[in-house]
Image (cartoon, rainbow, N blue to C red):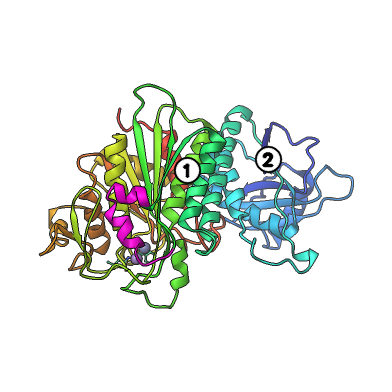
């Protein structure tokens, strides 16, 4: 999709020309700059069909010969000044209309005089439109021509401040497309998205953007004593991979940010097998890995400066096949710590532990962030609206909270601490992989903390938000692509170290 910004709507051709209108005070007319639409709106308002309420829409056909748009759309903004998130939702609402009306070219008129900067408004509208028109239908056979959905080809934004709006639109386009790529990876079923596919994606990224990609296969993993990833991999015939992609700015002394994403391509639970209901959803257990690769791709496209970023995805299935890891087994992680396996279904922390310890030793990052669909407990605590955040560094945590708010991917910080650490003490090993006495999300967090040392680190538990995320106009059912835009927002504003 192409996005352009123009100052005036005059002469602009469109399949759909969109105006956003605030709710009028009682008895007041709606204010609309388009004369024909204004007339129709006056009638619609009198009939109570359209009052400018938040999320309301009205499609109008202009009289022949008037203007260059074949359809007009009014979208209600409600009474309050719209936030960035409201604009994102507006973009999603427009996407819905575009899909129904088979629109190829959509033009949105950004209202002037609202508090939000033009860049933020343009970014949010672009994001909402792209995220809201996302579909995954590559495995659906098309029967009738009618049913073939159309993709939007072009978005034109009309804005007074063309230059600032352009910057916002570019960020919006790039971030939203990256989130859609993460959704695509997640939507691929486990028989079509294996650890080898993660490796191929990383290598392709490296080739296209001139980055460095290193893939550690079974032999290298064994040499490096990655006991966690290898243990989880024991029960599957699908070989494990650790995919490492480096984005370097070329600036000497630039700090490194390490991103680690859980790439569990299918989580059956292993010998501690999961109940069969909804087990198919465990193909999404790789959403953290998808997010970090998609984020790196967007960074490379934007040529973001000032910060080196390394993404690591430990990838494997978790299956109960012959040779599978067993409850009671004791394994040795990359950093030498031993772990008693209580449940083979608490596998995410085992593969992340190796990746964290290895990545920190090898790349000496200024900060580390991991993203993982780690615990069902985070859904119990926060539902599907907030990502769980745990961190050993207040500054990093604050930056992530801010980026979460800005991106519409909010996070909520949970505590860590010694008391929780006691819950994962084992009688026979250094740690056990399941804590007793509740707080399942936090005990998983303190487990990971054992592998990061003093490095500033944040853990995002996205089990509740990676799919089934809060229903919004720009978040369709299925995987949300969560984390991609949050990370990009964080990286675009990287300043937590002064
Ligand atoms: N991938 C799951 C976590 C999960 C559960 C994500 C539900 C999304 C929805 C993870 O590997 C897991 O199975 N965790 C266990 C841990 C338990 C055995 C301590 C869980 O949450 O049940
Ligand atoms: Mn599991
Ligand atoms: Zn899992």
Is residue 242 left or right of 135 when viewed as pictured? Answer: left
- Asked if residue 261 is positioned above or below residue 9 in the image, the reply reads below
Check if residue 221 falls in the magenta segment. yes
The residue range painted magenta reads: 219-237
Q: Are marks 1 and 2 in contact (CB under 8 Å)?
A: no
> Foreground: 240 or 412?
240
Ligand 3, image quadrant it occupies: bottom left
Question: Circle 2 sits on which residue?
Answer: 2
SS at badge 2: strand
Residue 74: x, y in percent? 68, 51
Q: Which mark is residue 295?
A: 1
Q: What residue sits 20% from the left and 69% below the top? A: 328
Foreground tag (1 vs 2): 1
Q: Is residue 82 left or right of residue 362?
A: right
**Between 296 and 265, the one nearer to me in the picture:** 265
Mark sitting on residue 371 = none
Name the image quarter holding residue 52. bottom right
């Amino acid at each position: 999709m192409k996005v352009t910004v123009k100052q005036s709507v005059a002469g602009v051709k469109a399949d759909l020309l969109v105006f956003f209108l605030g709710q009028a005070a009682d008895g007041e007319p709606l204010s609309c700059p388009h004369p024909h639409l204004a007339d129709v709106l006056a009638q619609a308002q009198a009939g109570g069909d359209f009052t400018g309420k938040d999320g309301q829409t009205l499609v109008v056909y202009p009289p022949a010969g008037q203007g260059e748009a074949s359809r007009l759309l009014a979208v209600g903004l409600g009474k309050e000044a719209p936030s960035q998130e409201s604009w994102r939702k507006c973009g999603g609402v427009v996407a819905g209309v575009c899909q129904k009306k088979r629109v190829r070219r959509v033009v949105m008129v950004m209202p002037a005089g609202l508090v939000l900067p033009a860049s933020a408004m343009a970014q949010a509208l672009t994001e909402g439109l792209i995220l809201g028109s996302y579909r995954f239908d590559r495995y659906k056979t098309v029967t009738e021509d009618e049913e073939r959905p159309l993709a939007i080809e072009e978005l034109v934004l009309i804005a007074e401040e063309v230059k600032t709006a352009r910057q916002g639109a570019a960020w919006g386009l790039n971030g939203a497309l990256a989130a859609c790529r993460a959704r695509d990876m997640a939507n691929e079923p486990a028989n079509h998205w294996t650890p080898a596919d993660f490796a191929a994606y990383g290598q392709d990224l490296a080739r296209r953007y001139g980055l460095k990609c290193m893939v550690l296969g079974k032999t290298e993993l064994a040499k490096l004593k990655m006991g966690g990833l290898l243990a989880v991999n024991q029960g599957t015939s699908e070989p494990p991979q650790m995919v490492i992609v480096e984005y370097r700015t070329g600036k000497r002394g630039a700090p490194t940010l390490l991103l680690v994403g859980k790439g569990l391509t299918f989580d059956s639970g292993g010998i501690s097998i999961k109940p069969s209901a909804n087990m198919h959803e465990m193909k999404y257990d790789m959403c953290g890995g998808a997010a970090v690769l998609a984020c790196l791709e967007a960074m490379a496209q934007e040529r973001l400066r000032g910060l080196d970023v390394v993404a690591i995805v430990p990838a494997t299935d978790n299956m109960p096949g012959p040779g599978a890891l067993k409850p009671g087994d004791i394994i040795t992680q990359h950093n030498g710590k031993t772990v008693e396996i209580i449940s083979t279904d608490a596998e995410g922390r085992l593969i992340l532990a190796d990746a964290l310890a290895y990545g920190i030793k090898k790349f000496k990052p200024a900060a580390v962030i991991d993203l993982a669909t780690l615990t069902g407990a985070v859904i119990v605590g926060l539902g599907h609206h907030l990502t769980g955040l745990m961190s050993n560094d207040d500054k990093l945590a604050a930056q992530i909270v801010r980026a979460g708010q800005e991106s519409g991917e909010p996070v909520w910080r949970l505590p860590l601490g010694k008391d929780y650490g006691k819950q994962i003490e084992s009688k026979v090993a250094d740690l056990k992989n399941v804590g007793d006495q509740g707080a399942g999300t936090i005990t998983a967090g303190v487990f990971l903390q054992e592998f990061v040392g003093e490095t500033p680190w944040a853990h995002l538990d996205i089990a509740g938000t990676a799919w089934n995320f809060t229903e919004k106009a720009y978040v369709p059912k299925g995987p949300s692509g969560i984390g991609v835009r949050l990370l990009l927002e964080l990286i675009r504003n990287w300043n937590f170290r002064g």
